[in-house]
């Protein structure tokens, strides 16, 4: 599985431990809050937002697409069990619609044991993704300002350059070109803090790490398929409205993803 997909399964595993503990103490309100926050923050505001590109643009049987589908399946298997004692009818309807052979009732199930956890010793561990989430939130705030001013229509119309040092520089650089998928921008570059131009704005991070940003509207053409603004749009005679990545996904072997 891709690194981001492993992260979301790990996040579900960590949450399940808390859910079980609260059920044992009949803290139903705490369970509701935990699941609600997980759905709105980790899933809705981050994970599902990022994987839409893979779901819509990569080949149907590609590892990249199947990886996030597998992750979502694991999360759903766990979540429907978390919800069953509280939202019984909704959980039952979801259970009956889920693929694969299964018992008739979700209420006869025990907690899902298919979740797994990240090794804290690996490079892209929980701390790594927490750092990425913080950067994404900061960049999104700045891009929202550009959107409101009319400089860009959506974040995919933006090109961003990030400037930082230390562990954060290593973390952002580790994603390579795939950083743009996390930030939902057409391009994303990373450089050391000393290279930041005078117009770069400070991005406030909870960690206190220094981060500067330069964001501007892309001057490149928009791909009709993935909506990214890329320099190679129009360079393929058979698909003049597509970027090189989409041409590879439509007619080639398909793009390769490692992380996001």
Image (cartoon, helix red, strand yellow):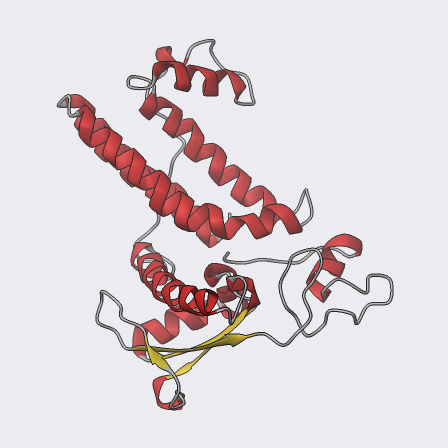
Pick whichever, 188 or 127, lies toward us: 188
Relative side of 51 to 20, left or right: right
Give left or right: position of 111 versus 102: left
Return the x and y of residue 87 as percentages of the image width and height. 33, 19
Q: Residue furthest right?
A: 238
**Residue at the spot x=37%, y=75% of the render?**
169
**In this image, 21 relative to 163: left or right?**
left
Q: Residue at x 32, y 80 (%)?
A: 165
Which residue does the image show at 40% across and 63% down from the upper left?
A: 140
Picture residue at 25% right of the left edge, 30% below the top: 32
Residue situated furthest left in the rendering: 25
Q: Is residue 101 above or below residue 175?
A: above
Nearest the viewer among 119 and 180 is 180
Q: Position of residue 161 (x, y in %)?
A: 46, 77
In the rendered view, would you say 147 is above or below 254?
below
Q: Position of residue 159 (x, y in %)?
A: 53, 73
How many marks are shown on the rendered structure? Answer: 0
Q: Is residue 212 at least partly visible in the picture? A: yes
The answer to whether residue 117 shows anywhere in this view is no
Q: Is residue 201 above or below residue 62?
A: below
- Residue 123, position in %: x, y? 37, 62
29 relative to 128, above or below: above
């Amino acid at each position: 599985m891709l690194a981001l997909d492993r992260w979301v399964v790990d996040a579900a595993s960590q949450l399940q431990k808390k859910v079980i503990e609260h059920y044992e103490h009949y803290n139903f309100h705490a369970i509701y809050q935990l699941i609600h926050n997980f759905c709105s923050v980790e899933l809705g505001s981050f994970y599902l937002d990022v994987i839409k590109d893979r779901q819509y643009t990569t080949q149907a049987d590609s590892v990249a697409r199947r990886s996030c589908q597998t992750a979502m399946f694991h999360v759903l298997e766990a979540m429907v069990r978390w919800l069953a004692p509280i939202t019984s009818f909704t959980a039952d309807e979801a259970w009956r619609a889920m693929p694969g052979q299964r018992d008739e009732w979700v209420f006869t199930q025990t907690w899902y044991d298919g979740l797994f956890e990240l090794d804290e010793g690996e490079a892209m561990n929980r701390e790594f993704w927490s750092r990425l989430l913080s950067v994404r939130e900061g960049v999104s705030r700045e891009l929202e300002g550009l959107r409101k001013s009319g400089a860009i229509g959506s974040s995919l119309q933006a090109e961003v350059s990030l400037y930082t040092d230390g562990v954060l520089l290593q973390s952002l650089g580790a994603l390579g070109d795939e950083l743009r998928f996390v930030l939902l921008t057409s391009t994303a570059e990373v450089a050391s803090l000393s290279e930041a131009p005078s117009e770069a704005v400070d991005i406030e991070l909870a960690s206190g790490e220094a981060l500067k940003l330069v964001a501007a509207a892309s001057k490149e053409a928009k791909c009709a398929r993935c909506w990214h603004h890329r320099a190679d749009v129009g360079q393929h005679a058979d698909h003049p409205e597509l970027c090189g990545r989409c041409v590879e996904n439509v007619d080639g072997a398909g793009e390769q993803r490692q992380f996001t």
